[in-house]
Image (tube, rainbow, N blue to C red):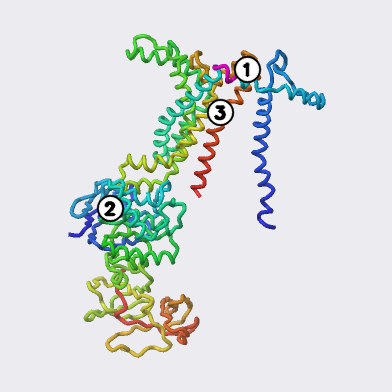
Amino acid sequence: MSARRIFARPARLAAIAPYLWMVLFFLVPFGFVLKISLSQTAIAQPPYTPVFDFTAGRAALAAAFAQLSFDNFRLLLQDNLYILSYLRSLVVAVTSTLILLLIGYPIAYGMARLPQRWQGVAMMLVIVPFWTSFLIRIYAWINILQHDGLLNQILLALHIVSAPVVWLSTDSAMYLGIVYSYLPFMILPLYATLSKMDASLLEAAGDLGASPLQAFWLVTFPLSLPGVGAGALLCFIPIVGEFVIPDLLAGSNSLMIGQTLWLEFFTNKDWPVASAAAVALLLLLVPPLVLYDRLQRRQLEAGR
Amino acid sequence: MPLLRIEGVAKSFGNFRAVDKLSLDIRAGEFFALLGPSGCGKTTLLRMLAGFETPDEGRILLGGSDIAQVLPHERPVNMMFQNYALFPHLSVRDNIAFGLRRAGMARGEIATRVAEMVALVKLEGLEKRRPDQLSGGQRQRVALARSLARRPQVLLLDEPLAALDKKLRESTQGELMELQRRLGMTFIIVTHDQEEAMTMAGRIGVMDAGRLVQVATPRNLYEAPASRWIAEFVGDINLFNGQVAARDHGRLTVSTSDAGTLAVSELWPPVTKEVVSVAIRPEKVKLSRRAPASDAGGSQTINRLEGVVTDVNYLGGVTSYRVKLETGAVVRSSMANTARLDVDAYLAGQRVVAWFTADDCLVLEQ
């Protein structure tokens, strides 16, 4: 029996598994959301029409289909609340990702250069915060940042400020929360690429006349770009849709798209518009994902 | 004044003394090989010359000035790495130009020099390729071109051919020698392969446990090794332990337990100890069916050992034999297959006489 035969079956099954997962837990729910986004809001249970009734026969189903429209998407373009939310989400995500990169790169670089036995310890320290619930950690920040919180107490005690500073409900607090929460997602992929780097390349650069700083910019940094890309996307994409951190730490005068979505769903009970906003958000995130995939594929091809 | 003078250089890693108070002079234009088993400190010494390790003590004088503390990027020395260490994100051209750009050379000059280097290592047409699009041999050439591009005063080569297959290695050895001669540059190569060292280098420094145990031309290293360890490390050798029984005008008589009494010509400086080893290279041990007449060549004393052939290994150019003596000791002999139809080949089980002259023997302290 050929090797191909032996491996064919389980291999094929293993290949189907991720597709099955995607269909069940992504495509089907997305189908629901897409359908709701094309429906009209109604005071009913569920709060939209039409509801497909697969037992009512073909004609009724066709009539229900005919009622679907792009009105909600039109609304997204007309009311600048949505466009502003999208823009704010993008601005927040880009800014946060840049800050994360600036903080995360040196940490990952330092970790990769630690003696082998300390690297594991450093890795633990990066991961340890995950052992506490994310929500509790954000509440802890609220505690630290509030009017009579730890930060203001320290600043007052050190006479750096004379009156308590307003930290909570500002963009600074939100950025702090986002950067704090997402830092491990930036550090880990960066560390993975930097720790794989061949040390003899830096020696070669030095041997050929590059100062340590030049060697970093000419060799280490370009070779770590896949890690930079992975870390940036790993942070950027979830930050765009972030809801909890801006809701708890930022002010209420401008909303990120995640917050707008939440409002539409739970306060306005306008499921169709909320669904349309969700679909639009997804479409917005497709280009960076495709870009990432392309980059990775190029990397794989180069690696062969 | 030699181009490079290494003076009492030592380097330890923790408790391990990698290089132990080593001194060595290397002349300009020399092809020098550092040979030794793995862990002998040869690579550490090379890395100190390149600047990747700083000596704990001692001086490294290049053209008269001490460079022991100079950073790698400020040394007029380049290194070709064992794994080549090519920059994977740069093309062949950019890899070769890397060092020239750092030196602040003008753009036009860089282009000329790169073209010159590409031609030198015969890589024309591959300038735009990335290292991963090249074969092992081509990568080796890029690494060589890159390290030569800055025209260093000394080129250090760390096991440069270890990753190549045998045929390619042999042709590359020739090319390296030819290049070195043409450029008149000083090459220091580190290798664990004695054949490679002997083929290429004008002088070889043998290292063991952080020390330089002998510096000699390939011929002297092979024919007059300074110690028993070197004799065994470089090439094959038969060794018979014994005691000096008589000394007579540079001729020693050594009585051995394994091979009876042997006549040996004494080397300079003479051996002072009484307990010695007699060493004889296998290709100097001849076999014949009957004992050759005494003084076959006139003034030569001939040692004869009778025994039975136990193993015959035909290797193409030579055949190597193992002959078991009556004492149970084994003598190895290798004889060139000078004729295609060799009527003189010996078979396992055959009784033979293994013989060699007193001049072909070495006497070494144990």
Is residue A182 in view? yes
Please tell me in which quadrant of the rendered image residue A165 appears: top left
Q: Alpha-carbon neighbours of circle 2 within 10 Å: few (<14), some, or many (≥20)?
A: many
Q: Residue at x 43, y 48 (%)?
A: B88
Would you say A238 lies left or right of A109 here? right
Kind of residue at disc 3: Leu
Quarter of the picture containing the N terminus of chain B is: bottom left
Tag 3 near tag 2, CB within 8 Å:
no
Marks 3 and 2 sit apart, C-alpha to C-alpha, by: 54 Å
Magenta extent: A75-80
Kind of residue at disc 2: Val
Is residue B12 in view? no
Find residue A266 and report its horizontal and vertical position in percent.
62, 15
- Pointer 2 chain: B
Which residue position is annotated with label 1? A265
Q: Residue at x 24, y 46 (%)?
A: B69
Quick check: A226 above or below B266? above
Q: Residue at x 43, y 38 (%)?
A: A119
Indicate yes or no whether the magenta region holds residue B53: no
Q: A235 or B3: nearer the eye?
A: A235
Sequence-wise, which precedes: disc 1 or disc 3? Answer: 1
As drawn, the label of residue A195 is none
Kind of residue at disc 1: Phe
Which residue position is annotated with label 3? A284
Label 3 SS? helix
Tag 2 near tag 1, CB within 8 Å:
no
Find residue A56 and report its horizontal and vertical position in percent.
82, 24
Which residue position is annotated with label 2? B77
- Pointer 3 chain: A
